[in-house]
Amino acid sequence: AAFSHQHFFLFIMMANDPFACFGGDGSSSSSDDDDARTNNMEKADRLRDKSNFEQPSAVTDLLHKHESSFEMFDATLASGKGLRAVVAYKQGDEIIRETAIMRIPNSQPAASREAAEQLHKNAIQRAYNSLHHESQKSVMALASCNEDGTDVARTPQGVYDTNSFRLENDPKGGLFLTIARINHSCRPNVTHFWSPRLQQKLIFAARDIVIGEELLTIYGPGQCMATKGRREYLNERFSFECNCEMCREGNANGGDERMLKIQALQEDIALQSSSGLVSTTDAEGQLASVTKCLALMKEQGLGGGAFTKSLFHHGYDICLAAGDYDGARSYLNSELTAVMDSEGVHSTKAIEIEEALKNFQDTE
């Protein structure tokens, strides 16, 4: 059979990283499990841990386990429940960290597509059956984009496939009861990051957020597209037509044109970086592309750390290759800020960048 001795890959929510169009991979470095970084756990104690693993109860209990800095509310008829801030957040503030209530393999070894799909369904059902009955109710209260609004009854598989995340390089995906309540915007005010060491999904403020403002993340697509393309993707994948702020604007203020320019610049920068050939003359033009892309993203309202950190790293690489060490240090400092804002002050990547900056100082 065509699928014999192969893994059939099942695509779930966020199978394509929604930050990929901005050059970020959303992942931590491979050394995230290094024992030398265990002091991160002590830093984490001051943060609210909305852990479904430790508290298998309804999502409302998770929200009120501690005095919460956000609340669940009825957002709109189309999007259903959502989360909104009850305190103000600054860009880079950590809002949520959550352990998955269900972890399912992203792929199943099978001799056929049908067999792989059945194994996937069975794995979800087993995980669901093992949950506390209140947690089961909370899972089934989430949306199922391919079942809701049809004659088909909502199923655990439908809910999981709609709301779960691929967790970067982890072989298993995850469903997070609280994070699943965060609705979509093409111009999000929060971003997410999977910490392999903590085994938790972290949510950070992508910009300043005021009291009463809904928390909104991005579901995709994995490219920078104009409004029509984004809406088509979201409608096909999640069965809704996006009516977010960016989509309502369309190209009224040049937004669609900016998104396409950002995509083109990202592709050019990635191509130039992959070639590994940078001279002093090349560096000037490449840095101009990085600067232009950053300016367009800020103008489009996408200037948060998750969107910009890889661009700053490209700037660092370009300057370093051209022998511009002052420029390299400047870009590395900017990357550090972006990483801290989107992965945490004590994340592995932040520590690595701090070490690189220290090495700059030691060689002076």
Image: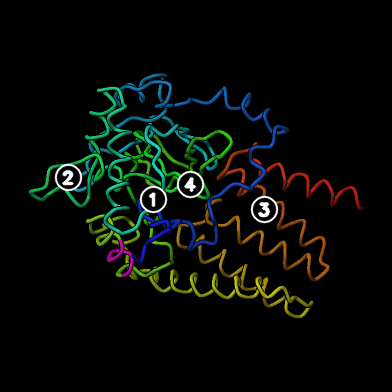
Residue under pointer 3: 334
Tally the numbered discs.
Answer: 4
Residue under pointer 1: 108
Of pointers 3 and 1, the one earlier in the residue sequence: 1
Of pointers 4 and 1, the one earlier in the residue sequence: 1
Q: What element carries label 2?
A: loop
- Mark 4 against mark 1, which lies toward the viewer? 1
Residue at 65%, 71% (x, y): give it: 274
* Amino acid beneath label 1: Gln
Of pointers 1 and 2, the one earlier in the residue sequence: 2
Residue under pointer 2: 77
C-alpha gap between disc 3 and disc 2: 40 Å
- Image quarter of the N terminus: bottom left
Q: What element carries label 4?
A: loop
Q: In this view, does 193 lie to the left or right of 179?
A: right
Neighbor class of circle 1 (other Cα within 10 Å; few <14, some 14-19, many 20+) is many
Mark 4 touches mark 1? (CB < 8 Å): no
- Mark 3 against mark 1, which lies toward the viewer? 1
Neighbor class of circle 3 (other Cα within 10 Å; few <14, some 14-19, many 20+) is some
C-alpha gap between disc 4 and disc 1: 10 Å
The one of 311 and 8 positioned closer to us in this rendering:
8
Name the mark on residue 171.
Answer: 4
